[in-house]
Image: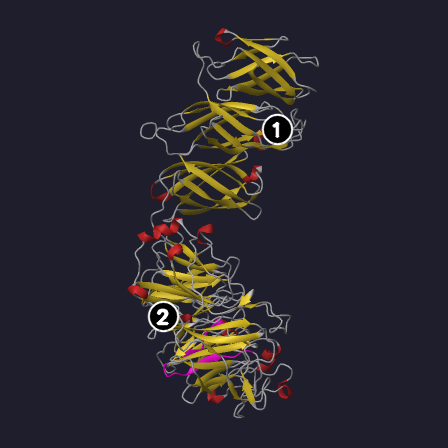
């Protein structure tokens, strides 16, 4: 047994949890579906209500990583005393890696410090596995490993958690029952015990009239049950591979000893001669549910496909596809049962009645106080009187196509769940169907359903958990299996009203991928959801992360490439209480939208745009320096990231350190490709003390570019200009770095779509010019722009086969005199230069433009020669 502490993994929101009041004392969830009646309700929930369970106030607080997939329902103990006297609310999680974890449910420093203890109970079994489950080509229902599948049970009086761990040790497969101290994870001194059982029986797999438990054939899927000092563990099979049977084994909670009086086998005497190749079976699956127990100690369960011969009055012992009541006063013996009239058809078509579990309703007023409901793969919901399952003891009706139970209701899908109960209503969610709520009155379920949910749940449907404060504030919680899974909250008074789902806030509340039959646990204001190697914890969000009031500017673009209709510029104005107005520029089209950030700084929008399906926008405020709005946007065709920084500067109270005048160059590709501009774009930038940036420039094909925006606290400029009537753009982040050789730099995307009937680059291009620039101080007589007197001007590219060099003399007042009839001038106030030079190929002179970079001590620009762009270099000689 190994104990370890998980590494730190989470940050940010977790640190904010200290602002949320912690709930100590209150509910415990010690067994599957909250109680032995399997009602699924916690009626002591005072924090979560229909008024505050919404995307603005409720969401994922953090997640605990675990070492395997979680199929068991998380369990919960309030006010648990730990070693050293520390008292915590603790959530317990079991994994298919055969580990049990105890986590602090209210960590003050987030998930990083929340692990209280962890134990591993032996090597898990890799799947798929040909040693068992080979009837359909290998057991694949639970992958990639099998370990702990059924939900454990906790004896709070003895502070002990009981769990079945399935191990693969050499060539042996072993089930062991472990009893763990819930404060430390240590094994009790009588723990563990190897599961071994034998009973009288001559059915499939028996020998000499003895039926022995075969661990290699028996899957422990159903939840464990603690009743009257005995831990009962149900078993089924692996992928219907024979021979297997349905077993229930009872172990003393005090010493884990198995009593012969606490053994039940659902098909002990089914022989191949009598029942064919698939004799036996009758697994106790129940969609992971647990055996239900009434106040008198009797058990209630459903049994899956298997042999059946319990015909009325004939004393049969095989109970495939049946509801069964077991008495515990005479060992585990069948006290009552019900089998649908079409059991033979169900068995031959794999329509297990036992795919779902039973719910015992709390005592009801009227003549039928003791009721239970359950349904299986055939999609029939059965309401059964627990005091007498069937009218006149007609357990199995051979006289017609009807069943002698109190009520049957046809559902719209096969059922793999445990129904839930709250305040006179039964809730059930079959596979590929919506949630149906049936009121119970005078011993009958309402028809039609009192309310129908708005969401269709794929296979295997969902098992609901209920939170409420007595009879008030009822919420129905379910997990929709998916990749990722989805946590859903419906109003218990009307399940058509969906209060919340974990998809609404984008990535903020995203769950791990779902596992089959996952059941949420609700206690003391939090919701716990197990999944693929993960436990997610939901609750009321800390109201401390609203975005700062102000203006934010930034860019958005796809993760793979920058494309015109998938990138652009965004500006956001945030007002008090998190309201915002946003403007998005994409190609030549502006789009405006408004919204509201919630208490966690999260918002979402659906934005209609021209020519494509609506964009789904999810973003979150990230405090820091600089404050940032970060998120994603996109649709079914593409997805990109958004980053926008707050403009924090103020001319009086917080002047921008970047204020001043700059010149910059956008370097050409320089690869000689005549299909791309080879020249250098250029421009000037002015930043005022309030952080407002104004850019004017010219690209190397002669296109003018202009932008007015703001700069971030750490000197980032979101450069975006729409070009060519929306058929091109210039986009990228520019950093004001104040480095030794330059003051600003960046790598941009300059894109032009093919455009017919234009003279300059009609086939378009996609290049990534590097931006370089520096501060510029306007020249004077005493401090000229140029600090050299002899220079050169080099023209290359365009239609020129070789570069042309011209020599320049720099005179007073920065008058420039060139050789070879070169004419050139520079403007001392801006650093811009221009001129013309003879074309060595003849024809009109080459007209050039550019700008000088002071810190780099050279200038650069472009010229156009027959609409081809060439490069200009100007510097000292």
Secondary structure beneath label 2: loop
Q: From the viewer's perspective, tell me whether residue 535 is left or right of residue 767.
A: left
Task: Tell me, yes or no, whether the highlighted magenta stretch contains residue 298.
Answer: yes
In the image, residue 434 sits, relative to residue 874, either above or below, namely below
Which is in the foreground here, disc 2 or disc 1?
1
Image coords of residue 304 (percent x, y): 54, 78
Give, as a single range, the part of the protein colored magenta.
Answer: 288-304
Q: From the viewer's perspective, tell me whether residue 130 is left or right of residue 412.
A: right
Secondary structure beneath label 1: loop
In the image, residue 559 sits, relative to residue 539, either above or below, namely above
Which residue is disc 1 drawn over? 669
Within the image, what quadrant is residue 621 found in? Answer: top left
Image coords of residue 773 (percent x, y): 50, 25
Q: In this view of the protein, which residue sits in the foreground, 171 or 112?
A: 171
Which residue is disc 2 drawn over? 423
Q: In this view of the protein, which residue sits in the foreground, 129 or 174?
A: 174
Cα–Cα gap, marks 2 and 1: 73 Å
Residues under numbered marks 2 and 1 in contact, where contact means CB atoms less than 8 Å apart = no
Q: Residue at x 53, y 26 (%)?
A: 705
In the image, residue 600 sits, relative to residue 860, either above or below, namely below
Q: Quadrant of the C terminus?
A: top right
Residue 694 visible at all: yes
Q: Which residue reaches farthest top?
A: 812
Q: From the viewer's perspective, tell me whether residue 613 is left or right of residue 21.
A: right
């Amino acid at each position: 047994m190994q104990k370890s502490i998980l590494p730190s993994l989470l940050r940010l929101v977790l640190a904010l949890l200290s602002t949320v009041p912690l709930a100590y004392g209150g509910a415990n969830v010690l067994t599957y579906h909250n109680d032995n009646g399997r009602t699924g309700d916690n009626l002591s929930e005072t924090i979560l209500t229909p008024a505050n369970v919404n995307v603005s106030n409720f969401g994922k607080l953090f997640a605990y990583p675990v070492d395997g997939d979680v199929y068991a329902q998380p369990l919960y103990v309030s006010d648990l005393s730990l070693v050293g006297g520390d008292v915590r609310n603790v959530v317990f999680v079991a994994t298919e890696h055969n580990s049990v974890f105890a986590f602090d449910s209210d960590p003050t420093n987030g998930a990083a410090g929340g692990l209280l203890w962890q134990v591993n109970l032996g090597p898990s079994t890799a799947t798929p596995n040909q040693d068992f489950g080979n009837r359909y080509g290998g057991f694949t229902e639970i992958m990639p490993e099998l370990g702990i599948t059924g939900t454990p049970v906790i004896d709070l009086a003895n502070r002990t958690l009981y769990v079945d761990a399935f191990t693969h040790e050499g060539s042996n497969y072993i089930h062991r029952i472990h009893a763990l101290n819930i404060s430390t994870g240590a094994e009790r001194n009588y723990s563990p015990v190897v599961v071994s059982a034998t009973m009288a029986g001559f059915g499939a797999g028996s020998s000499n009239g003895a039926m022995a438990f075969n661990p290699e054939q028996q899957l422990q899927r159903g939840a464990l049950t603690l009743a009257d000092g005995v831990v009962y563990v149900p078993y089924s099979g692996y992928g219907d591979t024979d021979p297997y049977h349905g077993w229930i084994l009872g172990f003393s909670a005090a010493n884990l000893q198995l009593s012969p009086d606490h053994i039940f086998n659902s098909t002990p005497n089914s022989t191949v001669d009598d029942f064919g190749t698939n004799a036996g079976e009758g697994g106790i699956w129940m969609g992971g549910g647990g055996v239900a127990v009434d106040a008198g100690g009797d058990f209630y369960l459903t049994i899956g496909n298997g042999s059946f011969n319990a015909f009325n009055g004939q004393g049969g012992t095989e109970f495939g596809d049946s509801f069964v009541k077991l008495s515990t006063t005479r060992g585990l013996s069948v006290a009552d049962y019900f089998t649908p009239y079409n059991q033979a058809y169900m068995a031959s078509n794999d329509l297990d009645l036992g795919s779902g579990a039973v719910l015992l309703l709390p005592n009801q007023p009227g003549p039928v106080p003791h009721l239970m409901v359950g349904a299986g793969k055939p999609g029939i919901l059965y309401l059964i009187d627990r005091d007498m399952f069937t009218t006149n003891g007609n357990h199995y009706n051979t006289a017609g196509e009807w069943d002698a139970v109190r009520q049957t209701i046809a559902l719209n899908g096969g059922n793999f769940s445990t129904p839930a109960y709250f305040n006179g209503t039964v809730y059930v969610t079959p596979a590929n169907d919506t949630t149906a709520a049936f009121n119970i009155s005078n011993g009958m379920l309402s028809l039609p359903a009192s309310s129908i949910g708005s969401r269709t749940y794929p296979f295997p449907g969902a098992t609901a958990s209920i939170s409420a404060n007595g009879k008030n504030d009822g919420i129905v919680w379910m997990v929709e299996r998916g990749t990722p899974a989805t946590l859903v909250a419906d109003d218990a008074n009307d399940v058509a009203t969906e209060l919340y789902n974990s998809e609404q806030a984008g990535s903020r509340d995203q769950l791990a991928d779902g596992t089959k039959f996952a059941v949420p646990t609700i206690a003391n204001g939090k919701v716990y959801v197990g999944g693929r190697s993960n436990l997610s914890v939901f609750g009321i969000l800390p109201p401390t992360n609203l975005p700062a009031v102000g203006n934010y500017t930034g860019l958005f673009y796809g993760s793979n490439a920058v494309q015109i209709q998938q990138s652009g510029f965004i500006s956001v104005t945030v007002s008090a209480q998190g309201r915002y107005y946003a403007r998005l520029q994409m190609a030549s089209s502006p789009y405006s939208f408004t919204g509201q950030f919630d208490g966690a700084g999260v918002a979402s929008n659906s934005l209609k745009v021209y020519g494509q399906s609506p964009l789904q926008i999810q973003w979150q405020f990230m405090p820091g320096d600089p404050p940032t709005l970060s998120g994603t946007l996109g649709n079914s065709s593409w997805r990109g990231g958004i980053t926008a920084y707050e403009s924090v500067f103020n001319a009086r109270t917080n002047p921008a350190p970047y204020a001043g005048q700059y010149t910059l160059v956008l370097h050409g590709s320089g690869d000689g490709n005549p299909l791309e501009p080879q020249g250098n774009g250029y421009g000037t930038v002015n930043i005022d003390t309030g952080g407002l940036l104004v850019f004017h420039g010219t690209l190397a094909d002669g296109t003018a570019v202009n932008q007015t925006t703001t700069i971030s606290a750490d000197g980032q400029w979101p450069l975006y200009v729409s070009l060519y009537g929306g058929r091109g753009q210039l986009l990228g982040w520019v950093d004001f770095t104040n480095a030794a050789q330059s003051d600003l730099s960046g790598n941009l995307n300059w894109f032009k779509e093919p455009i017919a009937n234009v003279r300059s680059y009609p086939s378009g291009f996609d290049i990534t010019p590097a931006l370089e620039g520096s501060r510029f101080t306007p020249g004077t007589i005493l401090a000229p722009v140029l600090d050299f007197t002899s220079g050169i001007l080099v023209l290359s590219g365009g239609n020129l086969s070789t570069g042309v060099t011209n020599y320049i003399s720099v005179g007073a007042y920065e008058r420039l005199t060139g050789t070879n009839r070169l004419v050139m001038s520079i403007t001392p106030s801006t650093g811009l230069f221009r001129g013309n030079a003879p074309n060595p190929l003849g024809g009109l002179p080459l007209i050039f433009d550019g700008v000088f970079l002071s810190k780099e001590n050279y200038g650069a620009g472009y010229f156009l020669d027959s609409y081809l762009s060439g490069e200009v270099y100007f510097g000292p000689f």
